[in-house]
């Protein structure tokens, strides 16, 4: 089983209106809502790939209930804790007069306290017993320990469970003090981390996935390096593509595939997300079609 951990779930809300006029009333014409948070996207992608996956989150309020219902309706098994407050909503306002204009307004989300985190750790330990891999993705709620990711990695290592990370900043810095099997960063995140901590920060990473937008994926695994990309005729939305790529890599690694297949599968999953309007979602038949089109360079 792959355990997908999403510490900070959200409802991703896309609101469409003609224009935004500051200081005046603005009428929204259409709203679309999707379950959000990097770990949510990973879990939904793995579920579509028919993987054995469990989604562990920190759930709060009516928004948390909506997110959970959306995931269970798609067949995802859930675990985690319920806390006071409300999970965040992340609003993207799209002006139909110029759809390239996207304005984001992000809610703060719930407050995690020490008792909540201890309960979360106990739930995490229980889920780890069933897991062969854990994928920890995204940010943490306010009040979380600065070494929250590190604590989860350490517990997984004690249980000989591979950990794949997709996070940045202080959480990543502390997590890298432990043995981390895999890590996904985009190119700008990688360069920023190298600037802050040096390239040797990644020397213990066995599986390092660097995404470079249209340039594709650079995958370093088992002392080998490979480049993979696929060209799409049309892109509908790239939101969540990195998370779908993470899901594809975790799925392929968990199946014991060789590096070429891991790279092709990851790229196909990330690209499949671009073909659909649903955020952070892919369809298995798209992955299968794209897989054979992925170009590999050693």
Image (spheres, rainbow, N blue to C red):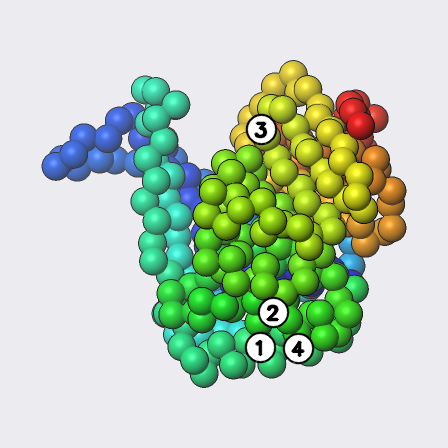
Are discs 1 and 4 less than 8 Å apart at CB? yes
* Label placed on residue 125: 4
Corner quadrant of residue 15: top left
Write the residue at 66% across / 36% down: 270
- The residue nearer to you, when weighing 237 against 15, is 237
Which numbered disc flags the more N-terminal residue, 4 or 3? 4
Which numbered disc flags the more N-terminal residue, 4 or 2? 4
Which numbered disc flags the more N-terminal residue, 2 or 3? 2
Position of 195 with respect to 233 (left or right) is left
* Label placed on residue 152: 2
How far apart are the two marked residues, 1 and 4, measured between alpha carbons?
A: 6 Å
| Whether residue 197 is situated above or below residue 160 in the rendered picture | above
Corner quadrant of residue 132: bottom right
Task: Say which element carries label 2.
Answer: helix
Which numbered disc flags the more N-terminal residue, 1 or 3? 1
Position of 51 with respect to 23 (left or right) is right
Write the residue at 55% across / 76% down: 120
Are discs 2 and 1 less than 8 Å apart at CB? yes
Q: Mark 3 = which residue?
A: 213
Are discs 4 and 2 less than 8 Å apart at CB? no
Label 4 crowd (10 A; few <14 / some 14-19 / many >=20): some
């Amino acid at each position: 089983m792959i355990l997908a951990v999403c510490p900070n779930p959200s409802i991703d809300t896309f609101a469409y209106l003609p224009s935004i006029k500051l200081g005046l009333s603005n009428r929204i014409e259409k709203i679309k809502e999707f379950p959000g948070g990097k770990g949510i996207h990973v879990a939904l992608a793995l579920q579509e790939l028919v993987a054995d996956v469990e989604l562990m989150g920190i759930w709060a309020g009516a928004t948390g209930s909506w997110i959970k219902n959306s995931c269970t309706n798609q067949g995802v098994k859930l675990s985690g804790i319920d806390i006071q407050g409300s999970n965040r909503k992340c609003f993207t306002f799209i002006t139909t007069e110029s759809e390239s204009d996207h304005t984001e307004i992000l809610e703060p989300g719930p407050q995690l306290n020490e008792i909540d985190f201890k309960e979360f750790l106990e739930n995490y330990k229980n889920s780890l017993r069933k897991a062969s891999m854990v994928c920890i993705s995204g940010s943490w709620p306010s009040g979380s320990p600065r070494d929250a990711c590190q604590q989860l990695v350490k517990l997984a290592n004690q249980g000989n469970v591979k950990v794949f990370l997709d996070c940045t900043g202080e959480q990543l810095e502390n997590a890298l003090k432990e043995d981390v099997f895999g890590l996904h960063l985009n190119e700008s995140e990688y360069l920023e981390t190298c600037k802050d901590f040096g390239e040797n920060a990644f020397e213990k990473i066995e599986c390092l996935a660097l995404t470079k937008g249209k340039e594709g994926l650079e995958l370093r695994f088992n002392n080998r390096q490979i480049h993979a990309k696929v060209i799409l005729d049309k892109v509908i939305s790239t939101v969540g593509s990195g998370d779908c790529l993470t899901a594809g890599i975790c799925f392929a690694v968990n199946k014991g595939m060789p590096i070429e297949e891991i790279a092709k599968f990851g790229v196909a999953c990330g690209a499949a997300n671009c073909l659909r309007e649903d955020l952070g979602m892919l369809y298995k038949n798209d992955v299968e079609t794209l897989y054979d089109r992925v170009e590999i360079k050693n």
